[in-house]
Image (cartoon, rainbow, N blue to C red):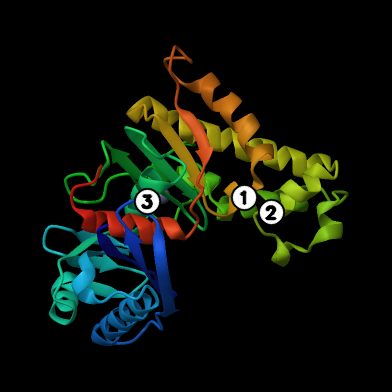
């Protein structure tokens, strides 16, 4: 059995896991990233996290075929360089070279959302799919496209930014500078904004009994909607419409075998998924036909980042 290391390097945590060739995590370890601090200190902690995970798995670096790292921001995977990472506050940092100096193993680098998508294809919700798009509904809307077990990175390694495709021309402002982006409506942040707006227009809503404006999160509209509140149910309904619009765009562009949804909002499960499937399929250009894109929930959670990073190191993905 071959073994690999997968590292999920985030702005908050460094997570490392020992992963076997079947996508099983044998051991994992984590520590805080503690940004901002010098890159070399973070690198030393990545190495330390890897060594701790290895020791838990009763393995050494010599047992490892390679190391993969998923990192937020724009990567140059050919050079192994973090081109720009907003979360880590890094620019042009040769992460692969630096890690190789300490680990003496091959090191590979990819964008974290893409790497997590690879994990879901390797061992999660899109297992075995010839093409899949993983969409994360969190603070923003992240996405990763995997075709024939390879990440579609695009010419500038900045592909799959479905979050910044416009679904409402001239709509709500987005952090990217455009207006009406999919992310402005389908992210948890977008859902929070729509919930607050609805509360301000409907002082009679049950939402006011559950929270004040400052306490609104991505779950509250679903909770109040289930309790029969009309205002909240309308927010959820509108949210699902926006999400369906964006997913139909993805299907029309890529026609993936599977779209898997991750992130906080996806935890709503069936009350989200069942109407979402129906509305998305209604908007797809080709109709249902014989075969249609499955819309599922991600199953690996944070482990997708570790497993997908290990798959980068596998080098010759299935
Ligand atoms: Zn945008």
Q: Earlier in the sequence, mark 3 or mark 2?
A: 3
Which residue is tagged 3? Answer: 119
Callout 2: 10 Å neighbours few (<14), some, many (20+)? some
Report the front residue among 72 and 260. Answer: 260
Q: What numbered label is drawn on residue 219?
A: 2
In the picture provided, is 109 more to the left or to the right than 260? left
Q: Nearer the viewer, residue 252 or 242?
A: 252
Q: Residue at x 57, y 55 (%)?
A: 189
Q: Quadrant of residue 5?
A: bottom left
Of tags 3 and 2, which is closer to the observer?
A: 3
Image quadrant in which the C terminus is located:
top left
Tag 3 near tag 1, CB within 8 Å: no
- Per the rendering, the mark at residue 267 is 1
Q: Which mark is residue 107?
A: none
Q: Nearer the viewer, mark 3 or mark 1?
A: 3
- Do callouts 1 and 2 mark residues in contact (Cβ within 8 Å)? yes
Residue 197 lies left or right of residue 244; in this view the side is right
* Mark in front: 1 vs 2: 1
Task: Tell me the crowding category of disc 1: few under 14, some 14 to 19, or many 20 or more residues within 10 angstroms, Cα based.
Answer: some
The residue depicted at 73 percent of the width and 38 percent of the height is: 234
């Amino acid at each position: 059995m071959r073994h690999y290391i997968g590292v999920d390097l985030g702005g908050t945590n460094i997570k490392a896991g020992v992963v076997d060739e079947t996508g099983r995590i044998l051991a994992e370890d984590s520590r805080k990233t503690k940004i901002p601090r010098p890159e070399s200190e973070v690198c030393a902690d990545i190495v330390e996290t890897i060594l701790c995970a290895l020791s838990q798995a009763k393995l050494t670096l010599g047992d490892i075929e390679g190391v993969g790292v998923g990192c937020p921001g724009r990567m140059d995977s050919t050079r192994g360089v973090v081109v720009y990472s907003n979360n880590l506050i890094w620019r042009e940092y040769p992460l692969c070279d630096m890690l190789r100096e300490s680990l003496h193993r091959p090191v590979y680098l990819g964008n974290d959302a893409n790497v997590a998508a690879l994990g879901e294809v390797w061992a999660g919700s899109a297992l075995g799919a010839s093409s899949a798009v993983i969409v994360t509904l969190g603070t923003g809307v992240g996405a990763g496209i995997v075709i024939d077990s390879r990440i579609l990175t695009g010419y500038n390694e900045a592909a799959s930014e479905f979050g910044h495709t416009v679904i409402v021309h001239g709509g709500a402002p987005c952090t990217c500078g455009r207006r009406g982006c999919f992310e402005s409506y389908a992210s948890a942040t977008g859902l929070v904004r729509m919930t607050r707006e609805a509360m301000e227009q409907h002082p009679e809503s049950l939402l006011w009994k559950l929270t004040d404006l400052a306490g609104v999160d991505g779950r509250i509209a679903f909770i109040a909607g289930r309790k029969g509140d009309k205002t909240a149910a309308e927010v959820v309904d509108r949210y699902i419409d926006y999400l369906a619009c964006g997913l139909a765009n993805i299907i029309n562009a890529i026609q993936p075998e599977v779209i898997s949804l991750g992130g906080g909002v996806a935890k709503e499960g069936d009350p989200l998924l069942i109407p979402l499937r129906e509305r998305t399929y209604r908007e797809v250009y080709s109709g249902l036909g014989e075969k249609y894109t499955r819309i599922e929930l991600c199953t690996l959670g944070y482990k997708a980042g570790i497993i997908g990073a290990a798959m980068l190191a596998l080098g010759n993905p299935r």
